[in-house]
Image (cartoon, rainbow, N blue to C red):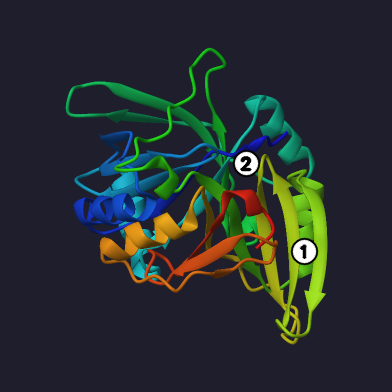
Amino acid sequence: MISGFDHAPIIVRDLEAAVVRYTAMLGRTPSWIGRHGGARHAWFQLSNIALEVIAADGDGVTGDNIRLWLEDHDEGPSAIGFSTPAFDEARRTLERRGVAVRPPEAMRSVDVSARRHLLGFAMTPARATRGLQLFLVEREASAAPWPVSRPIADDAAAIAAIDHVVVRTANAEAAIALYGAKLGLDLRLDRSNPDWGSRLLFFRCGDAVVEIGAALNAAVSDEPDRLGGFAWRAPDPEQARARMAAAGLDVSELRKGRKPGTSVFTIRDAVGGPNLVISATGAGEN
C-alpha cells in the first residue's frame, strides 16, 4: 500500500533564509520555488524523499494554516507524506482499518515563469494518527519522477537520501498498531536498551525507515506523537561535514558509526532539532 516516503513539509517563517540554510545543509539547490494557497515553497528533491520548505505569503488556506501552526509550534517539520502506487485503493484500505482520511485535495504551485507543479494528496486528521499529521500523495502514473536537486559542489559531499524519520511516542504498542497493522509498514526490529533508556521500533518504508522511539521509564499515555528529526545519507560524510562547517552550520565531530567502517556526525542547529548524517553504506545501521 505504501511504497516509501514522498515528501515532508518544513514550516518556516522566512523562506529566503530557510532556502539558504537548507542549501547549505543538503548541498543542493531547490528543484522548484513556487506559490500556492497563500504560501511560497521551495522543493528539495532527494533520491527517496523531498523536503518542501514552506512559509506563509499572502492570503489563502495554506498560508492561514501555516500561521495557525506557528502559533503553537516552532519552525520545523509538520507532517510526513507517503508514496503509494494505488492512491484511491490506499485511502479505502486506511478507512477500512479505522484511519479516517480526508477527501483528496490538489496542490497547484506556480513559479515565476508561470510553470505549474500539480500534486494530489489526502490528509489524515491528526487525531486519527496519534496526533502526527500523515498524508498520502497521488502522482500521475505517466509523470516522470522529479530529478534529484542539483548539487552545489561535489555530489559526494551532498546529502543523497533520507535514511530514517524519527517519531517520538509515549505508547509504543499503539505506534505498532498504527504503523504496522494500519499503515502496513514492515516492523523489522524492536529493540530495548536500558543504557539508552529507550525502546526503538524500526519500520521499513521503501528503502528507508520510520524509527519510533519510546522512553522505557516513562508512563504509557495518550500524549500525541511528535516528529523527532531526520537522519540523512551522504556518500562521503567527511566531505559533507567539512562543507557544512565551512558554510557556518553547527556540526559535531565525525565519529564511528555502529556499522564497521562507517562514519556519522550531527547537525546540531538543523531546523526543528538535531539531524544525523551517516555513511550511505551504513544505511539503517545508525
Q: Of residues 190 and 260, which is closer to you in this image?
A: 260
Q: In the figure, 120 relative to 15: above or below?
A: above
Circle 2 — which element? loop
Residue plotted at (44% across, 73% down):
252
Numbered disc 1: secondary structure: helix
Residue 278 appears left or right of 261:
left
Q: Estimate how packed mark 2 is, as few (under 14), some (14 to 19) or many (20 or more) residues with alpha carbons within 10 Å.
A: many
Residue 146 visible within the image: yes
Three-letter amino acid code of the residue under disc 2: Val
Residue 156 is left or right of residue 131, and the answer is: left
Find out whether the residues at labels 1 and 2 contact each other: C-beta distance under 8 Å.
Answer: no
Q: Is residue 38 above or below residue 90?
A: below
Q: Is residue 125 visible?
A: no
105 with respect to 65 (left or right): right
Cα gap from disc 1 to disc 2, whole angstroms: 19 Å
Q: Quadrant of the N terminus?
A: top right
Residue that label 1 marks: 174
Which residue in the structure is indicated by mark 2? 101
Residue 2: give x, y in percent of width and height: 69, 37
Q: Quadrant of the C terminus?
A: bottom right
